[in-house]
Every structure is written in structure tokens, then in C-alpha cells.
Image (cartoon, rainbow, N blue to C red):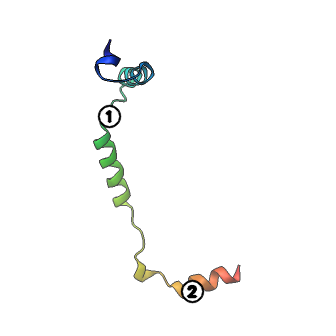
């Protein structure tokens, strides 16, 4: 049995077989790399562009 050869439970092996049959067998490293690239691609304002004093004043006025 494939599950016992790869030290998986039958439930784990079922999920893996379903993923493979649906073509969802992407490598975890590739998935993480794509996610990190997506995060790094976003533009966040730097600390020098945020005026902390005005931010606190706006919060107090609410």
C-alpha cells in the first residue's frame, strides 16, 4: 500500500491522491516563493513618509 510505504495515514494519502488527480500538486517551495514575490511586489509607504504626530491627532479627533 502506498500510504504505508510513505509513512502516511490513509486519510493523508487520500488527500494527496485527490490533489494529484486535480493537478494541485504544486511544490510548497514554489508556492512560498510565489507568495513572497507577491508580498515584495507591493509598495508600502516607508516610515519617513508617515507623519506619526498627525496620525495620532486624527485618531484622537475620531
| Image coords of residue 26 (percent x, y) | 32, 34
For image coordinates 34% across by 60% down, the residue present is 40
36 in relation to 25, above or below? below
Q: Nearer the viewer, residue 18 or 62?
A: 18
The quarter of the picture where residue 45 lies is bottom left
Please tell me in which quadrant of the rendered image residue 55 appears: bottom right
Residue 14, compared with residue 54, is above or below; it is above
Residue 58 percent coordinates (x, y) = 63, 82
Mark 1 crowd level (few <14, some 14–19, many ≥20, 10 Å Cα):
few
Q: Residue at position x 39%, y 21% from top?
A: 13
Give the quarter of the image for residue 23: top left
Quadrant where the image shows the C terminus: bottom right
- Disc on res. 26: 1
Q: Residue 45 carries which label?
A: none
Q: Residue at x 41, y 22 (%)?
A: 9
- Picture quarter with the N terminus: top left
Marks 1 and 2, how far apart in space?
46 Å
Residue count near mark 2 (Cα–Cα under 10 Å), binned few <14, some 14–19, many ≥20? few
Q: How many labels does the image show?
A: 2
| Residue 24, x across and y down, in percent | 37, 29
Residue labelled with disc 2: 54
Provide the secondary structure element on which disc 1 rests: loop
Q: Which of 50 and 9 is in front in this view?
A: 9
Q: Nearer the viewer, residue 15 or 50?
A: 15
Residue 50 placed where, x, y %?
47, 81
Amino acid at each position: 500500500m502506498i500510504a504505508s510505504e510513505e509513512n502516511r495515514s490513509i486519510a493523508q494519502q487520500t488527500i494527496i491522491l485527490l490533489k494529484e488527480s486535480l493537478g494541485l500538486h504544486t511544490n510548497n517551495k514554489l508556492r512560498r516563493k510565489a507568495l513572497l514575490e507577491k508580498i515584495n511586489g507591493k509598495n508600502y509607504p516607508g516610515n519617513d513618509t508617515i507623519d506619526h504626530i498627525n496620525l495620532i491627532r486624527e485618531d484622537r479627533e475620531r
